Amino acid sequence: MDFSSEHADVGEWGLIEALVLDGHGSARRTTRADLDSLQLGEQETLWLHLDRSHPQAQRWLRERSGLSAFACDLLLEEGTRPRVVQPDAQQLLVFLRGVNLNPDAEPEDMVSLRIFVEQNRVISLRMRHLRARAELTGELAAGKGPATAQGLVLRLADLMTDKIDPLVAELAELVDSEDEQIELNEGYSPDHTKMVTAKRRSASLRRFLAPQRDIFFELAKDKFAWFVGEQAKDWNELGNSLTRHLEELELIRERVGLVLESEHQRMGQRMNRVMYLFAIVTGFFLPLTFLTGLLGINVAGIPGSDYPHAFKIVCLAMLGIGLLQWWLFRRLRLMV
């Protein structure tokens, strides 16, 4: 069976997927009508995937799911951040974030996934399409999926973490390209829009990935032994994977800062050179401008006004003043 497509019609009560895991890597689909009378086998696990924004899904969660009001409030609240909550000794609420790979969406505008998990039941809620869910249902259809509720949540977290790597690599490649261009060409000016975008994306990703990393490490501890069990090392590896991504994102942010700082320094140096040359030119022509302005006064008594060679003499005098200034500037090392 093919479970991989996200239904255009999520159902009259917000059901996206209802699967019964057989405990051997496969699953069978069930329906809303069968849920009330569904009897699970010893190794079977029920997975319900709901549209959190659907009113009927919200009503079913509060009235028919058997979850406590506390758990329902947390699963349906508007704003969440990655965290893990234990309503009682045999239940967990796990809040995760995944990269937004939907069309026309910003990847760092991460999709929230809320998960309720107990021994043989998993209820997950989302508002936007999550590609990891489609991949997981595809694995179950092929008989290569998780066997337990714990394994289901672990695999979802694993698939969501895998989607982060290409985005981080893309940001790193962008910064590498700009950095390389600057080193090869002193006159190259980096694309400020791209640099600022890379910095913004890395900051947005870090905002959610840092607490998510802490969740994975927390789940690897013995305090959730009923849930984690032998999979503690897998949660720990997921935490280490996110740690590497976070370190790379921090490096990207620092490198973007260095690239922009380097560009600002180069712009400052160019501006200083321009102002320096402007000051030299101004200083060079200031005496000549004063002299021509003085001789250009339109009043009687200007010396040489009746002498036919006066203009030549003034030109030679100005040339002499210019040569004297050039010698003086070289002597004072104001000119190269």
Image (cartoon, rainbow, N blue to C red):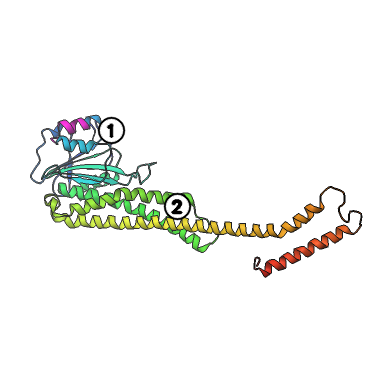
* Residue 210 in view, yes or no: yes
Rendered location of residue 234, percent (x, y): 20, 56
Dot 2 corresponds to which residue? 195
The boundaries of the magenta stretch are: 58-67
Tally the numbered discs.
2
Camera-nearest residue between 39 and 316: 316
Is disc 2 in contact with disc 1, using a CB cutoff of under 8 Å?
no
Camera-nearest residue between 116 and 334: 334
Quadrant that contains the C terminus? bottom right
**Secondary structure state at the residue bearing disc 1:** loop
Question: Taking 110 as reference, is 8 above or below it?
Answer: above
144 lies left or right of 325: left
334 lies left or right of 188: right
Q: Where, by quadrant of the figure, is residue 105 drawn?
A: top left
Residue at point 26%, 41% (across, down): 80
**Secondary structure state at the residue bearing disc 2:** helix
Question: Taking 111 as reference, is 162 above or below it?
Answer: below
Q: Which numbered mark, 2 or 1, is in the foreground of this view? A: 2
248 lies left or right of 288: left
Q: Earlier in the sequence, mark 2 or mark 1?
A: 1
Quadrant that contains the N terminus? top left
Residue farthest along the left direction in this orientation: 42
Rendered location of residue 9, percent (x, y): 28, 33
- The amino acid type found where label 1 is placed reads Asp
* Res. 9 mark: 1
Rendered location of residue 316, percent (x, y): 82, 63
Rendered location of residue 308, percent (x, y): 92, 57
Camera-nearest residue between 295 and 66: 295
